[in-house]
Image (cartoon, coloured by chain):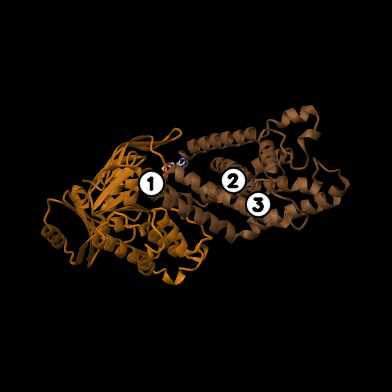
C-alpha cells in the first residue's frame, strides 16, 4: 500500500507539472516579466541613487527578495488555482473515488506548487544574472529556504483552495494578505533601517524570516539567527500541513 | 457475499434528510436499478458509497469490505460514472483516462491495452487526442464510462447513464452494460428515470422516495406484486367494460387497453369481448408494467 501511494503521488505531481507547463504563458512567463521590471526600475534606475546596503549594491540586495516574491506567488497560486479549478470542474471527484490517501493528495498538490515555485525562482535567478553579479554563499541554504518557503505557500494555497467557493475567493488572500506581507517582508529594505515600531511589527510577518534566511544563503548577512529563521519556517509548515490535513477530510463533491 | 450492502445509512444536508436509514443489498453479477423521482436521493446514495460525499451514519460494505475501515481496498472494486460531467474539459480524452489509471497506481504502459479496448468499445478512438471540450454530450458520457472502467472494477455505478442520450446510443449503452455483466462478471448499479428501460434491463429494482427505500426486490417478484396485468388490444369497435376482473378502457391517446386481474384467465377476456360482439384482432402485454407499480408506490 505504501508503494501504491507513491505511484499515485507520482501521477498527481506529473499531472500538476503538465498543467502548469501547458499554460506556461499564464504560469511561468508573468512572474519573469514582473521581476525583470523590478530589476530594471528598482535595481537599475532607482538603485543607482541608493547607497549600498551592508556592502551590497541595491540591485544585489534586491535579487534574493525578488526571487522569493516570485516563488511565493508561483507556489501559492499554482495550488489554489489547480485545487479550486478541480473543485469547480468537479474533476476532484476523480481523486475522491480512487484509493488516494489524504496525505498523498496533499503532497501531490503541494509538490506541483513547490515545483512551479522552484522553476520560476530558477528562471528569475537566470534573468538576474543579466543585471548584476553575486556569489552564492551557501547553495544548500538557498535551496532549503526555497523549498520550505514554497511548501508553506503551497499549503496555504491549498487551504485557500479548499475554502474557496467561487473565483473571487481565490484572489482575496493573495491581494489582501500575501502581497502586503511580501512587500513588508523585507524585499526592498533591510530591517536594520526601519524604526523600532516597524521592526517589532515585522516580527509577526513570517515572510520576513524567509527572506532573511534566504538572503543569508546568498550573502551571509542575517538580521535574525539562522536557526530562528529555520524554526519559524518549519513550525509554519507543520502548522499549515496539520490544518490542510484536517480540512481535506471534509472535501466532497459539492 | 453481497456486492454492496448498506446498513442504516443516513445523510443530512442541514435540516434536509437526503438518505433516511437506508438498508439495501445488491447481489453480485446483477444489474441493479435504483428508481426515484428528482431529488429522491439517488445521487446522494451513490456519492456516499463512492466517496465523493460523507454519510452521517451507518455502514457500507463493498464485496464485504467496509468503506470506512478498508477504504482503499473497497475503492479498487468501484467504478463511477456520475450524473454530471466531472472531468477537466481542457485535457485530452486519452489523458483523462490515463490520469485516472494513475490514481489507482497504474502507469500508462500498464493500461495501454485496456485503454485502447475501451476507446474502441465506446467509439472514442478517433477522438482520443481531442480535448474533452470538443466532444458531444453523448461522447462525454462515454468518456466517463471509459474512465470508470480503466481499472477493471467489479462494481460499476452509473448515475443516469441514458439521460439525454439518443435512441441509438441508448441501445448501445445497454448492450455494453449487458456485456460488462456477462464478460467481465461485473455488478451494475444504475439509476434511471426510464421505467421501461429498467423493466427490460434490470434484474433487481429498488425504489427510493425522499431518502427512504420504498421497495427493493427482484424485478420478477416486484411485477408479481401487481394485482393485475395490462394489455394493449386492437378491436373492430370501441369497447368499454368495468367489471371486477376485467376492465376495458381507452387511454388518453385513444389506445384501447384491458386490465386483467392476476387470477383471471386470458380466455375470459375473449369470451367477454365476444359476448359484447367485439372482435379482438390483437392483444399484447403492455411493456411498462413497472411504471404502474412505481406510480402506485410513489403516491
Ligand atoms: N450538496 C448539497 N447540499 C444541499 N442539499 C443537497 C446537496 N446535494 C443534494 N442535496 C439535496 O438532497 C436531495 C437528494 O438529492 P439527489 O441529488 O441525491 O437526488 P436524485 O435522486 O439524484 O435526483 P435526480 O433524479 O434529480 O438526479 C435533494 O433534495 C437535493 O436538493
Ligand atoms: Mg441524481
The label number, if any, that marks residue A147 in the structure image: 2
Confirm if mark 3 falls within 8 A of ligand 1.
no
Q: Which residue is mark 1?
A: A2
First along the sequence among labels 3 and 2 = 3
What tint does the image give chain A?
brown
User: Image point 11% across, 60% down: which residue?
Assistant: B267
User: Image point 69% across, 49% down: which residue?
Assistant: A136
Q: Are marks 2 and 1 on the same chain?
A: yes
Q: Classify residue A166 as left or right of residue B294.
A: right
Give coordinates of residue A142: x percent, y percent.
64, 46
First along the sequence among labels 1 and 3 = 1
Q: Chain of mark 1?
A: A
Establish if B281 lies above or below B204: below
Confirm if mark 1 falls within 8 A of ligand 1.
no
First along the sequence among labels 2 and 1 = 1
Contact, CB < 8 Å: mark 1 with mark 3? no
Give coordinates of residue B36: x percent, y percent.
34, 47
Label 2 SS: helix
Give coordinates of residue A253: x percent, y percent.
46, 45
- Give neighbour class at mark 2: few <14, some 14-19, many 20+ (Cα, 10 Å): some
Give coordinates of residue B270: x percent, y percent.
14, 61
Amino acid at each position: 500500500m505504501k508503494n501504491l501511494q507513491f505511484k499515485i503521488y507520482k501521477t498527481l505531481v506529473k499531472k500538476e507539472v503538465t498543467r502548469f507547463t501547458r499554460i506556461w504563458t499564464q504560469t511561468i512567463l508573468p512572474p519573469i516579466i514582473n521581476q525583470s521590471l523590478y530589476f530594471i526600475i528598482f535595481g537599475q534606475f532607482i538603485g543607482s541613487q541608493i547607497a549600498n546596503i551592508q556592502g551590497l549594491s541595491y540591485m544585489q540586495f534586491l535579487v534574493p527578495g525578488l526571487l522569493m516574491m516570485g516563488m511565493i506567488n508561483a507556489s501559492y497560486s499554482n495550488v489554489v488555482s489547480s485545487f479550486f479549478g478541480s473543485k469547480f470542474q468537479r474533476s476532484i471527484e476523480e481523486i475522491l473515488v480512487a484509493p488516494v490517501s489524504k496525505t498523498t493528495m496533499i503532497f501531490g498538490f503541494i509538490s506541483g506548487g513547490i515545483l512551479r515555485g522552484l522553476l520560476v525562482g530558477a528562471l528569475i535567478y537566470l534573468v538576474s544574472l543579466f543585471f548584476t553579479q553575486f556569489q552564492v554563499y551557501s547553495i544548500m541554504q538557498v535551496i532549503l529556504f526555497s523549498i520550505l518557503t514554497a511548501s508553506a505557500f503551497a499549503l496555504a494555497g491549498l487551504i485557500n483552495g479548499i475554502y474557496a467557493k467561487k473565483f473571487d475567493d481565490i484572489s482575496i488572500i493573495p491581494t489582501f494578505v500575501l502581497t502586503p506581507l511580501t512587500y513588508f517582508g523585507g524585499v526592498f529594505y533591510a530591517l536594520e533601517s526601519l524604526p523600532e515600531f516597524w521592526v517589532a511589527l515585522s516580527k509577526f510577518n513570517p515572510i520576513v524570516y524567509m527572506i532573511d534566511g534566504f538572503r543569508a544563503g546568498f550573502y551571509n548577512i542575517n538580521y535574525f539567527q539562522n536557526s530562528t529563521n529555520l524554526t519559524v519556517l518549519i513550525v509554519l509548515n507543520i502548522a499549515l500541513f496539520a490544518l490542510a490535513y484536517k480540512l481535506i477530510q471534509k472535501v466532497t463533491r459539492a | 457475499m453481497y456486492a454492496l450492502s448498506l446498513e442504516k445509512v443516513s445523510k443530512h444536508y442541514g435540516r434536509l434528510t437526503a438518505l433516511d436509514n437506508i438498508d439495501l443489498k445488491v447481489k453480485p453479477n446483477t444489474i441493479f436499478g435504483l428508481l426515484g423521482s428528482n431529488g429522491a436521493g439517488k445521487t446522494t446514495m451513490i456519492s456516499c458509497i463512492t466517496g465523493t460525499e460523507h454519510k452521517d451514519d451507518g455502514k457500507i460494505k463493498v464485496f464485504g469490505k467496509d468503506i470506512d475501515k478498508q477504504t482503499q481496498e473497497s475503492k479498487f472494486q468501484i467504478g463511477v460514472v456520475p450524473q454530471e460531467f466531472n472531468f477537466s474539459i481542457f485535457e485530452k480524452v486519452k489523458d483523462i483516462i490515463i490520469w485516472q489509471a494513475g490514481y489507482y497506481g497504474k502507469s500508462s504502459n500498464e493500461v495501454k491495452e485496456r485503454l485502447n479496448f475501451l476507446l474502441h468499445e465506446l467509439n472514442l478512438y478517433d477522438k482520443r487526442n481531442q480535448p474533452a471540450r470538443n466532444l458531444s454530450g453523448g461522447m462525454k458520457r462515454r468518456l466517463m464510462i471509459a474512465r470508470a472502467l480503466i481499472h477493471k472494477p467489479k462494481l460499476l455505478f452509473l448515475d443516469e447513464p441514458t439521460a439525454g442520450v439518443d435512441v441509438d446510443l441508448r441501445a448501445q449503452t445497454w448492450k455494453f452494460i449487458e456485456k460488462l455483466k456477462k464478460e467481465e462478471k461485473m455488478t451494475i448499479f444504475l439509476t434511471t428515470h426510464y421505467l421501461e428501460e429498467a423493466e427490460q434491463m434490470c434484474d433487481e429494482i429498488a425504489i427510493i422516495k425522499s431518502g427512504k427505500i420504498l421497495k427493493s426486490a427482484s424485478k420478477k417478484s416486484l411485477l408479481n406484486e401487481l394485482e393485475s396485468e395490462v394489455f394493449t388490444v386492437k378491436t373492430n369497435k370501441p369497447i368499454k367494460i368495468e367489471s371486477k376482473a376485467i376492465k376495458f378502457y381507452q387511454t388518453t391517446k385513444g389506445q384501447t387497453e384491458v386490465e386483467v386481474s392476476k387470477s383471471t384467465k386470458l380466455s375470459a377476456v375473449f369470451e367477454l369481448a365476444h359476448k359484447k360482439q367485439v372482435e379482438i384482432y390483437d392483444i399484447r402485454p403492455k411493456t411498462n408494467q413497472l411504471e404502474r407499480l412505481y406510480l402506485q408506490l410513489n403516491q
